[in-house]
Each structure stands twice: as structure tokens, then as C-alpha cells.
Amino acid sequence: MPKCPLSPKAGLDIGHKYIEVETMSRKAVVIGSGIGGCAVASLLAKSGCEVTLLEAHSFPGGRCASMEKQGFHYDFGVHMFSRGDRGPHGEVNRRLGGDLKWITRDPACRVMGRVEFDFPLDIKPLMHQVNLARNLGVRAKSYVGSFRLFRSLLKGDDVEVNDQVCLQDYVSRFTDDEMIHLFINCLSQLFFALSYKETSAGEFIWCSSRMFNEACFGYPVGGSGEIPKSFLRGLEAFGGKAHFSAPVVRIRIENGSVKGVETASGYYPADIVISNCGILRTIDLAGREHFPEDYVRKAEQYRYSNSYVTVKYALERRVVLYPVVFYMPHLPAEEVFRYVEEETVPEDPYLFMPVPANHDPDLAPDGKQLVIVGAPAPPGASGDLCAAILDRVHDKVCELYPDLEAAVLWQSRSTCNDAAELTGHHAGEAIGLAQTPGQAGRLRPELATPVTGLWLVGADVGARGIGTEMAAASALRLADILK
Ligand SMILES: Cc1cc2nc3c(=O)[nH]c(=O)nc-3n(C[C@H](O)[C@H](O)[C@H](O)COP(=O)(O)OP(=O)(O)OC[C@H]3O[C@@H](n4cnc5c(N)ncnc54)[C@H](O)[C@@H]3O)c2cc1C
């Protein structure tokens, strides 16, 4: 097994029980079992580090956790995976020799609402792009501009030059067609939990080109929670340890270098500490005095993605026949996410509706169905506002599927507060640090921190991509730096 090239350090006595008593050598502690934490922990264990992962909750996965109730396996989030096996999850799995398997469906999705059509898995053939424009109801005079936009998204050039451009302006360079603007605005909210007014065009081009060229949009066998769980099986296989219900209460730093972490029950010395719990939370766990003032100030000013409110429906029979439903509201592109800015209730909510049991039938008991629905909400939205948005979401779902209400065995709702509770991020943001022009690409916060040996991983730092895939990509980068 290759050695992890980290210098041995002496242990510290701070009055806590020592969990590890031998001389510290090649020891890494990972705080948090979100996708980023699980991926980097397992990859470092494979490269020869002695890895301990500490998770605050009793289960793994953070925002990508799955739960089970009465034989229904449902996700905390509303997840689909833009690159499936071809993206960073597949890459982590291959490096670990893991057993993560993916399901894709063609058509990938049913678009409903303002227009209705099946969205094909592979949009590369020109005929599929012609059909897309026709199905979206693009005006004849906007065809040329729309195809040039599709081409530029597929080609994926000019990512960096457009990192500082907002997506709405980028789309306007090609066309003013209302339906194209509405479609891209809804996609932006799907990819990044941000309106296209706020999204970095470079980031959108990067993600679209991969998603549309790889044609691997899919869902893992066993549900979203299977991704972190499979990474944790890798961690265990390479000799690492994971402890649950073990919130880290302090990151110990001396003379500008990390020394280890403390939980309520003990002290874990380490040469390397990797935090998956966000920049601000990491700074607070370590103590602000250990960081340059401008680093802390910047961390306080970062903008986060919107939150999502969700409903999970356990149904006594199959009601929705599509693998995924993407509902585009009957509203102008400019108006569709105004309710998020104004912190009100949507007139006609945009919905994203994956049906996990239509991918993997084992996720619901025989003949039954699990449907998950999500809609954006302002970050930090109050419980009352989330409840009001969820009522509107439920009404819309029942309007689209009049048979659904009578088939509901139980439903479970989640709000911004639940997401905050799950991650420790106060705004309950769905994705992480927002992929805005000032926070994408080279301007994304780095994996390294100013403290020697203290690193960050996850959807806030050091990578591009959509949600979980960005978190896994940051883990791949960090594992390559540290191996
Ligand atoms: C409703 C919703 C829909 C989404 N849809 C998609 C989608 O379709 N596709 C997609 O790819 N992504 C989607 N995402 C985003 C995606 O889930 C996240 O971006 C990703 O999971 C974040 O991973 P992370 O590595 O940053 O870790 P996080 O999920 O932030 O996990 C951090 C972990 O650290 C733990 N932790 C925090 N503090 C401590 C501490 N002090 N000690 C120990 N442990 C601690 C937490 O308990 C948690 O387990 C969605 C998210 C939501 C909520």
C-alpha cells in the first residue's frame, strides 16, 4: 500500500482522553460524512493514510442521505445525478473498486406545465435539438439563435471567459425567445438552486456540456444514500474508521498548524484535518483568531444557494409513470422565481419531481410508489413561509395528478430548517456556496486554508459541477493533492 507522505507529529495532552495513543503518523481526520467527506476519507485511506471520519448524525450522507420508512426508501433531497457513472461519483467508485451501480432512463424526463414533451437522454443528435426547440414552442425567428445557444452549451468552450458573466446575459446574446429564457431559468434553478439572473454562465456551460455530451443523467441503484454508503464501504475496506453521533466540537490548532479535533468523548490527534462542514463553521470550530482577518471577512460575505422545500409521497399504487417530471410554470421567465427574491409564495411553482421507484423498483414495496417533489425557497426561509410554499406545491401536484391524493399512504415534508439541521449550515441552502459570477471557477474558495494541515472539502469549495458531483469533484482534487 503506498504511504501517505505526511510528516509525523508528536501528540498533545489537553486533558481529554486520547482515542489514539501511539505517535501520530500519517493520520487524517475528516469532519462530516457528506459526499465530499466520505469520498475524500475513502480515497485517502486507499492511498495509505490512517483515516478517521467523524459524523455528527447517526447516519451518513448529509444532504445526500436516504431514509427508510415502512419499506419506502426516500432521499432527504430531491436528487438526480447529471453525469451518473461518467462523473465524479463514478470516478471515486472506480478508484475504490466499489460496487456503485447506476440506472438511466430514456426519455430521461417528462416536461410538463407551460409545454409538455419527453426530454430525451441524449440531446446530441441534431434532430433531437430541432425537436427540443419545436417542443419548447420556440418562435420560428428564434430558431437560429436557439441552435447556436444549444451548440455553445454542448461544445463547452469559453467556460472561463464566461465565469464572470451572468447566465441571463449569456442567453440574451443568442436569443430573446421567451421559452428559451424560461427553460434555461428553470434549468439553472435545477442545477444550482439559483435563478439564471444570479448564476455564472461559465459554470452553467461547464455543467451542461458534460451532462448533455455524456448522456448519463441517472440515479443510483439503492437510492441517493447509496453513494455515500458505498464510499464508506471503501473507507472500511482500506482500514479507515467512521464514527457516528460524534459531532466535532473543536479543531485544535497550535502555532498555525492543525493538531487534531475534539468531540465530547475524546481527542483525535491528526496531521491533517479535512472539514466537510462549510467554511464559516470550520472557522468557528477552529477559532477565528487562527485565521487572517480578510479570510474570515470573506467567509462571512459568501453568498449561498437557495434552499429547497420538499415533499415525499408514499403511494399505495403507481400514479406517476415518468422517471422524472420537470414542471415549467405558466409564468414569464422574468417572473418565475421572483417569489424567492421577495420571500413570498409562488403563484405557480416550478417543480422538480424524481420518482425513485421508477428507476429502482426496490425503493418501494411491491406495487407501491415513492414520489419526491421539490421547489426552491429563499435561503433561511421561516417555517411558516416554507409551509405555505409546500401547500402550493401540494396543490400543484394534485392538479397534475388528480389520482395522487387518494393514493397517499403518508407524506413527509422538509423545510429550510431541516436542511440547516442536517448540515449545520444556517441558511439550509440546498447546494452549498452559490455558483455566482464572483464565486465560480477560479474564484471558488480554495481547498487549502491558511492553517497548515487544515483543509476544506464539499460543495462549498475548489470544484465545478452540480451539487453532489461538485462535492465529489472537490474530494477527488483534494485526494490528489494529499496522496
Ligand atoms: C432538496 C435538495 C435537492 C438537491 N438536488 C440535487 C440534485 O438533484 N443533484 C445533486 O447532485 N445535488 C443536489 N442537491 C445538493 C447536494 O445534496 C449537496 O450539494 C451535497 O450533498 C453537499 O455535499 P457536501 O459534501 O458539501 O456535504 P453536506 O451535505 O453539507 O454534509 C456535511 C456533513 O457534515 C456533518 N457535520 C457538520 N458539522 C459537523 C461537526 N461539527 N462534526 C461532525 N460532522 C459534522 C453534517 O452532519 C453532514 O453530514 C440537493 C440538495 C437538496 C437539499
Image: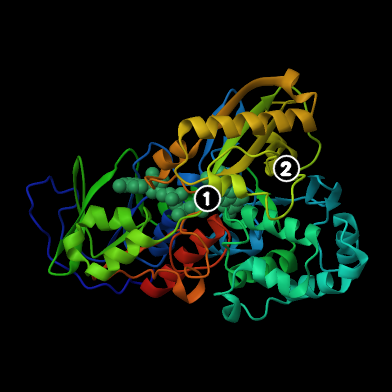
Position above or below: 238 against 264 = below
Position above or below: 344 against 254 = above
Q: Position of residue 168 (x, y in %)?
A: 66, 66
Which residue occupies the foreground of this view, 174 or 367? 174
Q: Quadrant of the N terminus?
A: bottom left
Could you tell me which secondary element the residue under label 2 belongs to? helix
Residue 234 in view: no
Could you tell me which secondary element the residue under label 1 belongs to? loop
Q: Amino acid at mark 2?
A: His
- Which circle marks residue 306 in the picture? 1
Residue 400 lies in what quarter of the image? Answer: top right
Q: Is residue 392 left or right of residue 92?
A: right
Q: Position of residue 299 (x, y in %)?
A: 34, 62
Q: Position of residue 240 (x, y in %)?
A: 36, 54
Which residue occupies the foreground of this view, 364 or 154? 154
Query: Could you tell me which residue is drawn at 67 percent across and 80 percent down?
Result: 157
**Residue tagged by mark 2?**
359
Query: Could you tell me which residue is drawn at 47 percent across and 32 percent down?
Result: 383
Q: Quadrant of the C terminus?
A: bottom left
Q: Amino acid at mark 1?
A: Asn
Residue 135 lies in what quarter of the image? Answer: bottom right
Query: Could you tell me which residue is drawn at 86 percent across and 60 percent down?
Result: 132
Position above or below: 462 against 330 = below
Query: Which circle, 1 or 2, is nearer the viewer?
Result: 1
Whether label 1 touches label 2, CB < 8 Å:
no
Position above or below: 370 against 119 = above
Tell me the crowding category of disc 2: few under 14, some 14 to 19, or many 20 or more residues within 10 angstroms, Cα based.
many
